[in-house]
Amino acid sequence: MQPYWKSSLADAEALAKTATKAEVFMLGQSAGGRNIYMFFYGKKNELGRTANLSSALGARNPAFYADKDAEDYRPTVFLAGGIHGAEFEGSMAVLNFIKIMETGTDFAGMPHTDLQAAAAQVNLMLVPFCNPDGRARVPFESMAGKSLKDLRYYDQGTWKENGALCGWPDCKAAHPIKGAADFLGGYFNDDGINLMHDNSFLPMAEETKILYRLTEEYAPDFTVLLHGGDNCEANYFLKPAYAPLCVKKTIMEFEERFEAECTPMSLS
């Protein structure tokens, strides 16, 4: 394993104890009682809020919810990793980003001072593990060298009825899945909830409520929910369903190159 590849809950705990430049918040705990941390860099904005978002939009002025035109306003970037336990890449990236913000180097000792300086111009909300329960259920640091079958087993789990792999997208057919699963994959918290498909208007999981509270409090300008584990050795970006046409065109052009270069993982 490469020295920069840090993807465990213990790695996040260690950073939470040693970080000196971040404000480290223990946001709450997962269904299984595991800590969820946010590392905040920057200066929190005074949003001048006089209304909730719905009311502000009804008044035809979102500044009543978050006034972002002040001279000292700093754009806020929210990066959230580890929503699915066997998808390590996002958590690894966030943990290395925290290391860079703290020291100027990643975990391999490679300097990234330009990135550190650029990131210092904005507010950063960094959550390495949104679903620590799912991560704790997966005994690997990476899926490198594993098969697609391994990924399906450890990410989506198996059905209680017949022991078959839940797979994707059928793993979404039961929610919460806990009562229907034999092995509960890393997609889910300990209550069997896939946080990606929690009830938007009446969330079932405390983890979801934590993320909602964060976005409500900080009103980030740019949010990325990081996943991983595609069936290909190449990098892959999901096509956004709601995006400007110019963005969709760029994604389509990327997909054409991706399809030409993709080497699928083995099922064995």
Image: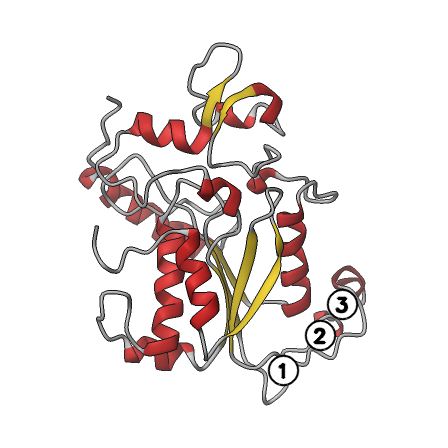
Residue 68 drawn above or below residue 99: below
Q: Which residue is mark 1?
A: 69
Residue 108 lies left or right of residue 187; in this view the side is left
Q: Residue 71: where, in percent of width, then height?
A: 60, 89
| Mark 2 nearby-residue class (10 Å; few <14, some 14–19, many ≥20) | some
Does residue 107 appear to the left or right of 212 in the view shown? left
Q: Nearer the viewer, residue 252 or 27?
A: 27
Q: Is residue 36 above or below residue 154?
A: below
Question: In the rendered structure, which amino acid carries the disc numbered 1?
Answer: Asp
Q: Which residue is tagged 2?
A: 63
Q: Secondary structure at mark 1?
A: loop
**Are circles 1 and 2 on residues that touch, CB within 8 Å?**
yes
The quadrant in which the C terminus is found is top left
Residue type at tag 3: Arg
Nearer to us: label 3 or label 2: 2
Image point 80% across, 69% down: which residue? 51
Q: Residue furthest bottom?
A: 71
Q: Which residue is the site of mark 3? A: 60
Question: Residue 111 at x, y = what percent?
Answer: 24, 75
Sequence order check: which comes first, mark 1 or mark 2? 2
